[in-house]
Amino acid sequence: MSLSRRWNLQEWRGSVREIVFIISVIGTATWAIRQKLNHLLLSTVFMVYLFLVFLAALKLSRLSAVTASIACTIVYYYYFIPPYASFEIHDLQYFFDLTLMLVIALTTSHMASGLKTQITLAQNRERRIRSLFELAKDLTGISEPEQLIHTCHRFVADNFQTRYVLLIPDVQGRFTTPASECHEVDLKFAEQILHREVYSDSDVFQNIAGDFVYLPLRGSSDNQGILVVDRTATKGSAEQESLLWTGMTLIGLALERLRYAARARQASLEVESERLRNALLASLSHDIRTPVAAMAGIADAMILSLPPGSHPVHGMLDSMRQQIAMMLSDVDKLLDMTRLHRDIVTLHKEWQVLEEVVGAALERCRNILQGHEVVVTMAEDIPLLEMDAMMMERVFCNLLENVARHTPAGTQVNIEANVEDQYVVVHFADDGPGFPSGQEEAIFSEFVHGQRMTGTVGVGLGLAIVQSVVKAHGGKIGAEHRHQRGASFKLFFPIGDPPDIILDQE
């Protein structure tokens, strides 16, 4: 038997019981009045029956009130209108009294029943509002999604008396086994509902699978979870559906708030971790630079103190100086990256000749490029570029150091520069082992090392600094693995509006 049919049967039985009860009350009242008939006025009897109709309309259903009105009119007409115990009417005045009594009884029952209905509606409305207020109050104190289960259980149990399952997705948008262990829930169907776009309210209650309705918990932009309830919860009145819909919205917004709060905490943690890391790197770099610089000075002093010639210690001291120079370079990179993260580096841009900046970088890296052949090719139409010469020199030095660290001696380094569209393109290419395919973007990340051929250890910041400085100049950089052998880096610098150079001619 369906729920609606069972409910109609229960309602019909209740109405029959009320009708039997009101007829028995009218019969008892009639018997009592007839015992005192000689002492009661007809108007008093009339008022007694109207009072019974009023009580029936106030306490019982509308059908019982109408039944009481008709029954009271018939009993009053049969027992108290002469000739008694008869339905004959010898005076039209009595007929008018009966008609008026029936009209008053029906009107009274209608108004009392309407008042009762309004009271019931007001009570139900007040109960729904209180339930939503309690739900909203409980949701404001929730800090974890798991705490929603108890709040949702109380809301559904108090208002719908049905079974339910609250499904909260993980970070991948997947559902695990529900906490209630209700194995009848279709998790795959629930995931389909979760990832659907937000649609009209009328379609929400149509997501039915088996004995359950899958209701999406909507946030401001997308669905935050699924509330699975028994189909009987959506078979009530429009007010019940509205209550369920409002509760779903509140729960969805609470889930969205918790998600945003978790993301904010994670972002704050990442910012704090990055700040601590930068502070640690800056402190460590300052602490390391002083003893390393002292070691470099000691190595230079030892070389000067040795007699000229091919002393066997010269080779070891030269190797020591090279290692110390690379260590100082790594320390400088740490300091540069720390300054870039803190945005305390100010670019002092001026119009520069690209060939001079590249030449200064080659001169600075002369020692670490020993054993490598460097070929520089510059186009004749390269204009002046607006850049910070010192920072750009450091960019080129980092690229050259990257070649020295990761390519064996005897390989060739090619530096080319030409004009393409509105950019000046500087191309660095080497004949080393290159880098694995698919790592074109990853090699510009911090603390990422490429394949080492020389055994030199670095901190993995050179290319990250290069990318940051190039972007600060409004340019871009890309990397690719050459088909034959080696790695290739292309730097794009916007030409801008360089000034005209006028040479004085005598």
Image (cartoon, rainbow, N blue to C red):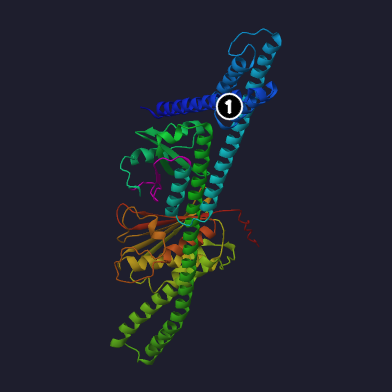
Q: How far from the left and from the top, in percent, is residue 87?
A: 59, 10
Residue neighbourhood size for the residue with mark 1, other residues' Cα within 10 Å, grouped as few (<14), some (14–19), many (≥20): few
> Is 300 located above or below residue 62 in the figure?
below
Q: Which residue is mark 1?
A: 32
Q: Nearer the viewer, residue 491 or 145?
A: 145
Camera-side residue of 289 and 81: 81
Which residue is rendered at x = 64% and y = 8% of the image? Answer: 89
**Residue 179 x, y percent position in the rendering:** 35, 50
Confirm whether the magenta stretch covers residue 167: yes
Residue 40 sits inside the magenta stretch = no
Task: Please say if 38 is above or below 155.
Answer: above
On the picture, is 34 further left or further right than 418? right
Magenta segment's dominant SS is loop
Amino acid at dot 1: Ala
Question: Residue placed at 49% from the left, 37% from the top?
Answer: 198
Q: Along the line of sight, which residue is nearer the eye, 400 or 123?
A: 123
Is there any visible trace of residue 200 in the rendered image? Answer: no
Residue range in magenta is: 159-176
In this picture, is 312 found above or below 403? below
Residue shown at the point (32%, 88%) measured from the top left: 309
> Residue 32 location in percent, x, y?
58, 27
Quadrant of residue 194 in the image?
A: top left
Q: Secondary structure at mark 1?
A: helix
Residue at x 40%, y 48% (from the top left corner): 169
